[in-house]
Amino acid sequence: MGKIIALTNQKGGVGKTTTSVNLSACLAYLGKKVLLVDVDPQGNATSGVGIDKGEVDQCIYDILVDDVDIRPLIKETTVENLHAIPATISLAGAEIELVSTISREVRLKKSLQEIKPIYDYIIIDCPPSLGLLTINALTASDTLIIPVQCEYYALEGLSQLLSTVRLVQKHLNHHLLIDGVLLTMLDARTNLGIQVIEEVKKYFQDKVYKTIIPRNVRLSEAPSHGVPVILYDPKSKGADVYLDLAKEVIKNG
Ligand SMILES: Nc1ncnc2c1ncn2[C@@H]1O[C@H](COP(=O)(O)OP(=O)(O)OP(=O)(O)O)[C@@H](O)[C@H]1O
Ligand SMILES: [Mg+2]
């Protein structure tokens, strides 16, 4: 039975998509059967695993708004063992269209439950907001990974995220857990990064992943080639650390 993990943080540009794509690919590389679900209208995770958004006729929008069968939407990717459900810009309308829909918060959960037994891991890439798309992702998930960028104001907005998580736990998904906070984009040349690590560890204690993702140019180059870093440059630091993260995720159960 698959474990459903959402990458979430309403703050933009903290490494949600980079982590969704590369964690999924590394889990697949380690022999797990993985599904990557793109719930962000930007569709960056979709193109990051080599799916041409222009060729996609139905996407996660159709599952959420039109309640279509999830199975035909599953696509192959550039990575063996890794499937994906794409998102396109049409998803931008879903946030508003779902407002008046019955059981609007549980639509993704209902669909993913049907295919959960086929996969070891289902990884959801969330948009940078706390709207209905993210609520659907939190409601569908077993656990959360919260990427936090090693920058000034790293903890800003996290209390709002945590109170949204508590509301979802109370009303929509009692067993939702925070697996951990992932520190991203560390620049080892500055003291600032070290300070942020200490601050985040003080706040989240043992909920912080041992693996810390450094800044690595290969990680930012890989998406334009439609492949995760493990295929783009397997010897890079970026490939190394995301493999470490995948092993840590597997070890955590
Ligand atoms: N470890 C890293 N090293 C270098 N560049 C990185 C790293 N992680 C992410 N990036 C780059 O930083 C930018 C933001 O990352 P990413 O898209 O993963 O964040 P996000 O949280 O998904 O953003 P959004 O909130 O817009 O969805 C991207 O251009 C990405 O290539
Ligand atoms: Mg993103």
Image (spheres, rainbow, N blue to C red):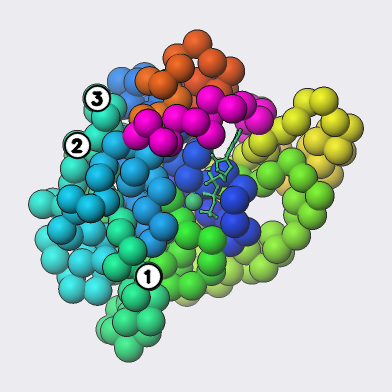
Number of residues whose C-alpha sits closer than 10 Å to that of mark 3, classed few (under 14), some (14–19) or many (20 or more):
some
- Which residue matches tag 3? 80
Q: Foreground mark, 3 or 1? A: 1
Q: How far across and down, in percent of the image, does residue 199 sit?
A: 83, 44
- Nearest to the observer: residue 217 or residue 130: 217
What is the span of residues highlighted in magenta in the rendered image?
209-226
Residue furthest top as drawn: 235
> Is 185 placed left or right of 251 in the picture?
right
Q: Residue at x 54, y 66 (%)?
A: 129
Q: Residue at x 28, y 84 (%)?
A: 102
Question: How far apart are the alpha carbons under marks 2 and 3?
Answer: 8 Å
Q: How far across and down, in percent of the image, does residue 8 sit?
A: 53, 54
N-terminal of the pair, mark 2 or mark 1, is: 2
Q: Amino acid at mark 3?
A: Glu
Number of residues whose C-alpha sits closer than 10 Å to that of mark 2, classed few (under 14), some (14–19) or many (20 or more):
some
Question: How far apart are the alpha carbons under marks 3 and 1?
Answer: 30 Å
The label number, if any, that marks residue 92 in the structure image: 1
